Amino acid sequence: MKRAGVIVAGTLALLFLAGCLNSSGPGNLVPATVDENPGLPRVIITVAGHSRGVHCRTFGNPSAPVLFVIHGSLSDMRAYLPLQILSDRYYVVMWDLRGNGLSERVTRNELTFEAMVEEIRCMKEMFSPDDPVTLLGHSWSAAFLALYLGTWPEDVRQAVLMEPPGLCGEFMNQSGQALNLFTTGYMDMMYKKSYLTALNHELLDFDMLAVLKSSVRDFHCDSASPPPWPVWRPGGFALIVWESAVLDGTEFRYDFTDNLEAFPREVLFVGSSCSPIGYDFQEKTNMTVFSKARILRLENCGHRIITEKLDELVSGLRDYLLEY
Amino acid sequence: MDSKIFRRRSLLLTRKLRRFMQIFLLLGFAGIVPAFSEEPGAVNRQGFYLGIDSSAFLCLNLGYAWNYPGVNPGGASWGGYGMLRLPLLLAAAEGSADSFEIAAGITADFPVKDSFHLSYGLELGVMRHDDTLGLAVPVLVSLDLMPVLRYETWYCGIATRITAAAATYIRHSDTVKEAFLDLSGGDGKPIEASPVDGWYGLTGLSIDGGIAYGRELGDHLEFSVNTGIALKPSPCAGLFDAMMTGQIPFYLETGCFYSP
């Protein structure tokens, strides 16, 4: 009798588990990507030997000079959509980098820094094959733009680098980015590890939504109340791959500065007052590797520049961009 | 009955076991049952563990364990326990204890040869966690296996545990719902979407492996230490740990039991 009870209970448990939702089911925990939802706007590019769909939006006149606006890590284009205001003079192209946002998820081998440069080149060939483009990047994408400037300088008309991390390990080791392990958000994340493991991209990206609110990395003027940062879907795996590639133990060891001094045109840096990689940091480190660079300083502002100081940012961009 | 004499006899794992109760207090992140929990004869034992892992996380564990007298198929010592686990620092930071885990388990210790034993454990737990992403109610299943050398006053073994979040109920917060807003198709028309609340299968999996050591200190005290590696079998998760803190996902807990 007891054995029969165990069998019945076990069968019921298995039936229950079989009926559970699948965490990797498209749109269950996080929005579906372009390969899962064909209704999303996308282009197909071939990078690192793989054809992938990227979530892409364009604004303005296609015959105008092209401006690429590229999001940073743990982000997608959503927070950058207000910059479509520049479509009065530019054909603004925004896309979610492969492995990020609503673009197709990719393997680790497709997320090398060389592949990120190749991705930008693919988009340049697609949207402006005959003319150089203007590039705007933020945080990690600004670092990729720096790599691109060193690799394909003739492709670039102008470049805006919004708070890139240190462009080499020596710079980054000076940034003093301590992790705040005593935030409620961090402790929630650690507690969650006991039942939520990143077994797939969906679970990882879902978990990363909490990172955006956790202030574990203090890039804000008020870490207790960080500014909003609208995201559809963070690319958790991409950030992990990039960060692990630049870390050697606990030290940063990498160099993105090759050939940057030879870039002939002026680069605009944008830096904030509160971020550990704000304008002070940029002036002392990254700007020194360019022969021509100037900085737009934003006061009372952290790393999430666009949601904090949009008007000042746009005004500063219009001062710099040639079409204004 | 002289409890000291009885305890020493029980260490030889006689077939006659007496019901006794243990109450132990554990401060630690892991819910590994103390290796002496199956030991009979120690009435109302109390103890604590202090533990830390590579995420600098602390958990307060309150437990109650007992043995089943006369239930010893295969010459094994059988026991059971119930436990309440509270994430201490999280509760302090939030000012509330609304995140917790309730677990119950059974243990069995089988003598193999001489001092060599195999200890097994099966635990079922239910958690409640309310955070930025919403309310989660995971159901956890853990299996313990410890090959162990047991002597009269001490033991040493290789402690392994596999834990699966077999199913997790998730009710999404506004933070997650906002991630589904403002989607639009290639034709510019809005796309309506929202996250799905419900039970999700297999949301977590981890494997702990390490060394456990315990020793009696006199008639009333027992000391134990357990340390090892906590592995997440996913290429994503291990790197996540590395990104946040620590390069090696270790755990370490030490504990002390007192019996009057």
Image (cartoon, coloured by chain):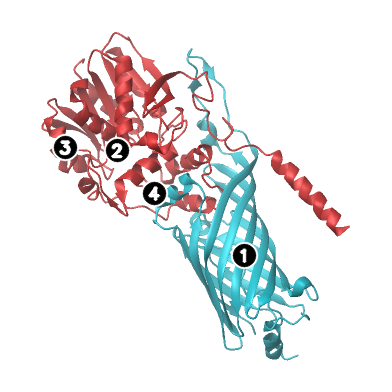
Write down the chain letter for disc 2. Answer: A
Q: Earlier in the sequence, mark 4 or mark 1?
A: 1
Nearest to viewer (mark 1 / mark 3): 1
Q: Is residue A11 left or right of residue B53?
A: right
Which residue position is annotated with label 2? A301
The residue at 27%/10% (across/down) is A64
**Chain A shade in the render:** red
Question: Label 4 amino acid?
Answer: Met
Question: Are the residues flagged by discs 1 and 3 in contact, CB closer than 8 Å?
Answer: no
Residue where numbered disc 4 is placed: B243
Do the residues under discs 2 and 4 have CB atoms within 8 angstroms? no
**What letter labels the chain drawn in cyan?**
B
Q: Chain of mark 3?
A: A
Do discs 4 and 1 share a chain?
A: yes
Mark 2 touches mark 1? (CB < 8 Å): no
Q: Looking at the rendered structure, which numbered label has been put on residue A229?
A: none
In space, the residues marked 2 and 1 are separated at their CA atoms by: 53 Å
Quarter holding the N terminus of chain B?
A: bottom right
Asked whether the residues under the numbered discs 2 and 3 touch, taking CB atoms below 8 Å apart as contact, a structural biologist would say no
- Type of residue at label 1? Leu
Disc 1, SS: strand
Q: Regarding mark 4 in the picture, which secondary structure is present there?
A: helix
Question: Which residue lies under the disc numbered 1?
Answer: B145
- Amino acid type shown at disc 2: Cys
